[in-house]
Image (cartoon, rainbow, N blue to C red):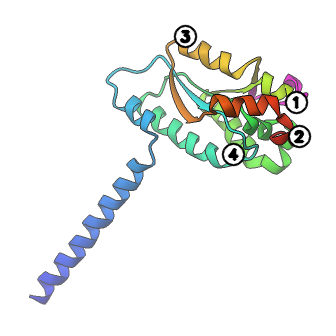
Amino acid sequence: MIRHSFLFILFSILVGTFSLSVHAETSNVHPQVQKILSQSEEPDGIVFDIETLDSGALKSMAPFVTQQIELIRKRYPDVDIAVVSHGAEEFALQKQAQPQNADLHAMFNQLVTDQSVSVHVCGAVGGLKNLTREDFPDFVSYSASGMAQLNDYKALGYQVVIIKQLSDKERKALFGSPEKFVQ
């Protein structure tokens, strides 16, 4: 009797642990990525949209984006994927910021070289800090406008995964008072 109770308890613990780990894996999937993964046909492409007022935000968002890309690659190994960073967070990708963002730079460089992901920053936002193409590493594509780049991807049939997007009011604040967000 005691042995049966012990086995039942052990079995219950194992089943509970397994269901928790399965839930943990699926609960960390972006809702838009989950929708893409459930499609029967491979999408034309996928673009991740990142736009914040926080110059440090990319450090916390990049691992999540990388995880989402890995999930997509398992299901659709050959789909085109891009990341467009077009807010204050893009400043973490400039060459000058590499020493304090070495892991971030390595992560994005690896996405570009190993996963064939295109990574774009916004020239209009970069211009708020007088940055040009030369101020970013080679793995970053410098687009004249992040919004235009997103619209180009949409026109090509890419599905957009919004990681963070500014409201019109926040976007106006960024361009109207860049000194508040550009350091």
Callout in the foreground (4, 1) = 4
Question: Which badge, 4 or 3, comes first in the chain's sequence?
Answer: 4
- The quadrant where residue 142 appears: top right
The single residue placed furthest to the right in the displayed view is: 130
Residue at the spot x=61%, y=13% of the render? 152
Label 2 with label 3: CB-CB less than 8 Å: no
Task: Tell me if I can see residue 150 in this picture.
Answer: yes
Residue 3 lies within the magenta run: no
Residue range in magenta is 129-140
Compared to residue 117, the image places residue 103 above or below, namely below
Residues 158 and 14: in front is: 158
Residues 138 and 161: in front is: 161
Q: Main SS type for the magenta part?
A: loop
- The quadrant where residue 7 appears: bottom left
User: What kind of residue is marked 3?
Assistant: Ala
* Residue that label 1 marks: 135
Label 2 with label 1: CB-CB less than 8 Å: yes
Residue at the spot x=67%, y=31% of the render? 169
User: Crowding at label 1, few (<14), some or many (≥20) Cα neighbours within 10 Å?
Assistant: some
The alpha-carbon separation of the residues under discs 4 and 1 comes to: 19 Å
User: What kind of residue is marked 2?
Assistant: Gln
Relative to 98, is 6 on the left or the right?
left
Residues 55 and 102: in front is: 55
Residue 178 location in percent, x, y?
Answer: 83, 34
Q: Residue 96 carries which label?
A: 2
User: Crowding at label 3, few (<14), some or many (≥20) Cα neighbours within 10 Å?
Assistant: few
Task: Tell me if I can see residue 113 in this picture.
Answer: no
Callout in the foreground (4, 2) = 4
The alpha-carbon separation of the residues under discs 1 and 3 comes to: 29 Å
* Residue that label 3 marks: 155
